[in-house]
Amino acid sequence: MLPFYAQLHTAAALGDHRGRHRIVMLYIEPTPYIIGLIDALREVWCGRIEAYYIMTDFTQRWGLLLDRQQGSVLPAGYFVKMHALWSALARDREHTILHLAGWGHPVLFGAMLMARSLGIPVAVETDTPEGRPVRYWRRIFRKITYPLLFRLPSRFLPAGTRQTYYLARYGVKPDRMTVAQMTVDVSAIHQFCRKDREALRSMTRLNWGISAAERVVLYVGRLEIYKGVEKLISAFSLAVAEEKCLRLVVAGDGSLRPRIEALAADIDCHVTYLGPLSGDDVLRAYLGSDLLVLPSLSESWGLVVNEAMACGLPVIVTDTVGCTDDLVRHGKTGLVVATGRESELAAAILQLIRDEADRVRMAHAAETLISNWTLANEARNITFAWSELAG
């Protein structure tokens, strides 16, 4: 990966040879999803795309090695970061569009102000959903400030339906929004699953030491309280008391890891802990399971839902998961339960486990629905908004 200033010099030397407008993209951190999206955007945007990141390994240790095309990390220190961004934005500002991943981080907000002072249009993507629980004082603060703040961006790119409602609540008009349809590389997942789904499923279960007769409930994500992991454990305990053939498989890392490891060590708990997974190992986990549960107490979107559906799994989510309105159609592609209700979550698990025909039907519907939520389509939605800003 080139140092930031080396990349900046290289970009200036190359010039905007692929189109008149270049895009300066700013994200909190590089993740597999973001890298995949940037690659998809390069396929459809005729101008230059320069990607920068505020930091690395913020939400978890991704261990990504970036090449020149995937972007670079800004230098350390707030004012140094801002100076570097000013240099990037001021160069050919008449043909530049700034694309931000939200507005909450000080560097993102500062970049937005700098761009507007330079006369550069700003596109902001957001996964913040309507209905997310917020403390009273924050609701008052946002009610006062957000209508003013949201005048700064030229265009918003909400992830989906709930994110659109959130922006509308603060006065953003429909003509300033383009729904991005936030997703993962569904096409690549389908290609992986087509290799030999049943063979992959059998081999995965063999590696886990789980029999073909057991029904596997999968959780993938951070092991933190806000993800509802403790609620899932309680719900699973209720479910396994009625159906002994159940197995909870957990993949991820976080502060609750010691508790998950202790449960996995107790043979009577029916819990298997895989640790953190990445790449194809995540896909194998989906294929080895019968359903995915995302029991979050708060969840902006939930890309694991996209991944699971692409692997042909029905999903159970809480009603605070941000992708619910778009992807989880209750009784069709999965089940939606009230947040924090262990008994309701247990009943949903038992419903899908006991009714194989219903589970298979939902799995097929989930895979069909998500087939249109590709990175290529998300990239086209985003570049449409860029084209509107380019004029």
Image (cartoon, rainbow, N blue to C red):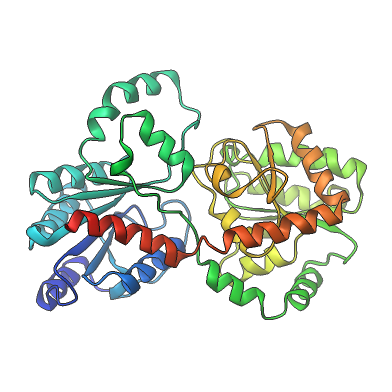
Residue drawn 71% across the image and 51% down it: 261
User: How many numbered dots are placed on residues in this image?
Assistant: 0
Residue 158, position as x, y percentages in the image: 39, 46
Residue drawn 66% across the image and 57% down it: 366
Residue 250, position as x, y percentages in the image: 69, 54
Image quarter (top left, top right, bottom left or bottom right) of the C terminus: bottom left
Q: Is residue 35 visible?
A: yes
Residue drawn 26% across the image and 41% down it: 106
Left or right: 49, with 285 as reference point: left
Nearer to me, 313 or 339: 313
In the displayed structure, 218 sits above or below 164; it is: below
Residue 322, position as x, y percentages in the image: 52, 42
Residue drawn 15% across the image and 77% down it: 17
- In terms of image quadrants, where is residue 356? bottom right
Residue 364, position as x, y percentages in the image: 71, 61
Nearer to me, 114 or 374: 374
Q: Is residue 30 visible?
A: no
In the displayed structure, 245 sits above or below 67; it is: above
- In terms of image quadrants, where is residue 68? bottom left
In the displayed structure, 113 sits above or below 353; it is: above
Image quarter (top left, top right, bottom left or bottom right) of the N terminus: bottom left
